[in-house]
């Protein structure tokens, strides 16, 4: 029975700012708690929503660049502001002062479980907490975004864009980390601890044919493999026993395979998993290269044919005019790519927002467009990708019969001879970016040509991991 004359507004601020491919887990759990207690709630998807009808409004924001919704901005400084509760990593992730960050994160991580309004209602999910929401144990209400998804599909958005909203159970099995990466919201954490049990967020709903509505699982764990063995092994076995395809969306820490005496066992267990999509790891720091190489040898022995991808973090703390830092960052990015290619692995370039500070920032964009698309990365070097953008334009827009690929030296000769300055020709943005970058760093010409010609099919070397 629904509570009389009460409706709670739920706001995914990132959704109102263009949206993401992922639902907001906090809002899913909030909706679950409200649903358990018969309280009406509504996902607000209109930027101009009239907030007068809402008793309370919870806003969650994941990304720091996401602005506050307009209706919240208008409410600030008025009596209406009291009905809002705002939280999420987007409210504090980029705070520079460590004490400010720590205070904001602690407050945010605990505010819903201490919320006066929520604590009027019983927790119906077990555990020691009798009143209010227990974020660990609360079952998400997975239908929260259904109306929004239907609207967007009707407007022409591809249904596959919303797979994460429709087909996945979502949660954390563990929380925490111990790596202290300065760009991460876990930078002050020192351990990995058990958080939720799989059954607390596993959706068992079936359709009329008896098929699971949400057959897949994805996990937001920050560093699952860094938990103690009694935690990761039992939880990994539960995932295997569920017989559902699953994936760790934040990736797994490849270095653990090299650091732990259980590295071989971890690789073996993962090789037997019904894993969904690519295995994702991270190769963020060049100083970790020896650990990464050791871990790759272990991983590839047990998973020689599994699609394996590594996040490649770059652009962090880059400022305008820091040319040497830019060059070194690009060089190290390509050296990481070279190692991955040798082991038959794929890269995925993750750019920190700082990359935009440099006037040559588009080089990161073009590298990401090449590296992050397996059909390009697998068969083309970065140079070949850049030139193929140019030749494709000439062939299809200008109707000129040119070869798909030519060596850089031949392209350079054409450029010097004025070929691209006549008959309405021009350089496409992709190759212009490469030309500008090489012009900026002429003293590194040969090194750049070598890096820009790295190619997976030429560098992959199975003898590196076959005993």
Image (cartoon, helix red, strand yellow):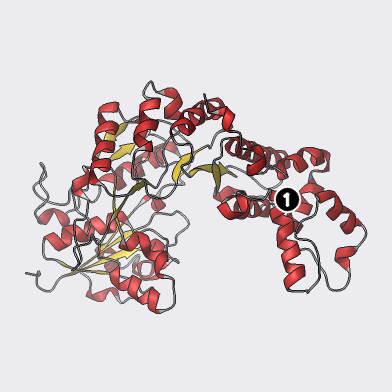
Q: Position of residue 332 (x, y in %)?
A: 64, 37
Left or right of residue 108, residue 456 in this image: right
Q: Decide: is 245 above or below 234.
A: below
* Residue drawn at the location 67% of the way across and 44% of the way down: 455
| Quarter-of-image position of residue 54 | bottom left
| Quarter-of-image position of residue 316 | top right
Q: Furthest residue to the bottom?
A: 154
| Quarter-of-image position of residue 388 | bottom right
Q: Decide: is 70 above or below 343.
A: below
Q: Which residue is mark 1?
A: 383
Q: Furthest residue to the top?
A: 261
Left or right of residue 272, residue 400 in this image: right
* Residue drawn at the location 75% of the way across and 63% of the way down: 391
Q: Secondary structure at mark 1?
A: helix
Number of callouts: 1
Mark 1: few/some/many CA within 10 Å (<14, 14-19, 20+): many
Q: Position of residue 74 (x, y in %)?
A: 37, 70
**Looking at the figure, which quarter contains the N terminus?**
bottom left
Q: Position of residue 378 (x, y in %)?
A: 60, 49
Asked if residue 373 shows in the view, the reply is no
Asked if residue 325 shows in the view, the reply is yes
Left or right of residue 385, residue 153 in this image: left
Q: Furthest residue to the right?
A: 417
* Residue drawn at the location 69% of the way across and 55% of the way down: 385
* Residue drawn at the location 40% of the way across and 48% of the way down: 92
Camera-side residue of 59 and 315: 315
Q: Position of residue 227 (x, y in %)?
A: 32, 31
Left or right of residue 232, residue 124 in this image: left
Q: Decide: is 185 above or below 165.
A: above
């Amino acid at each position: 029975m629904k509570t009389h004359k009460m409706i709670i507004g739920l706001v995914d601020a990132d959704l109102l700012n263009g949206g993401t491919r992922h639902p907001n887990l906090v809002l899913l759990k909030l909706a679950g708690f409200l649903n358990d207690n018969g309280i009406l709630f509504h996902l607000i998807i209109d930027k101009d929503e009239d907030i007068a009808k809402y008793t309370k409004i919870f806003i969650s924001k994941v990304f720091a660049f996401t602005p506050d919704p307009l209706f919240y901005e208008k409410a600030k400084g008025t009596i209406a502001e009291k009905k809002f509760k705002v939280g999420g990593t987007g409210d504090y992730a980029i705070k520079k002062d460590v004490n400010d960050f720590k205070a904001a994160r602690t407050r945010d991580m605990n505010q819903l479980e201490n919320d006066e309004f929520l604590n009027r209602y019983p927790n119906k999910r077990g555990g020691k907490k009798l009143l209010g929401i227990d974020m660990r144990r609360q079952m998400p209400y997975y239908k929260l975004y259904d109306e929004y998804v239907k609207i967007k599909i009707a407007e022409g958005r591809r249904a596959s864009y919303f797979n994460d909203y429709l087909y996945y159970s979502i949660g954390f099995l563990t929380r925490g980390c111990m790596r202290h990466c300065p760009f991460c919201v876990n930078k002050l954490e020192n351990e990995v601890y058990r958080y939720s049990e799989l059954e607390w967020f596993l959706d068992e709903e079936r359709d009329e044919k008896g098929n699971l509505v949400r057959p897949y699982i994805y996990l937001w764990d920050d560093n699952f493999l860094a938990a103690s063995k009694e935690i990761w092994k039992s939880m990994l076995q539960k995932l295997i026993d569920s017989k559902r395809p699953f994936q760790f969306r934040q990736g797994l820490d490849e270095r653990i395979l090299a650091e732990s005496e259980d590295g071989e066992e971890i690789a073996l267990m993962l090789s037997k998993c019904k894993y969904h999509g690519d295995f994702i790891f991270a190769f963020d720091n060049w100083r970790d290269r020896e650990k990464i190489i050791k871990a790759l040898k272990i991983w590839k022995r047990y998973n020689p044919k599994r699609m394996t991808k590594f996040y490649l973090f770059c652009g962090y703390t880059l400022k305008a005019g820091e040319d040497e830092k830019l060059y070194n960052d690009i060089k190290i990015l390509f050296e990481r790519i070279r190692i991955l290619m040798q082991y038959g692995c794929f890269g995925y370039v993750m750019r920190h927002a700082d990359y935009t500070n440099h006037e040559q920032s588009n080089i990161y964009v073009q590298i990401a467009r090449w590296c992050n698309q397996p059909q390009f990365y697998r068969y083309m070097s970065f140079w070949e990708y850049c030139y193929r953008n140019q030749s494709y334009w000439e062939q299809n827009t200008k109707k000129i019969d040119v070869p798909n690929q030519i060596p850089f030296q031949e392209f350079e000769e054409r450029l010097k001879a004025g070929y691209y300055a006549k008959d309405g020709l021009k350089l496409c943005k992709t190759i212009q970016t490469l030309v500008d970058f090489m012009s900026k760093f002429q003293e590194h010409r040969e090194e750049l040509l070598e890096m820009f010609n790295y190619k997976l099919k030429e560098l992959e070397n199975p003898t590196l991991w076959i005993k």
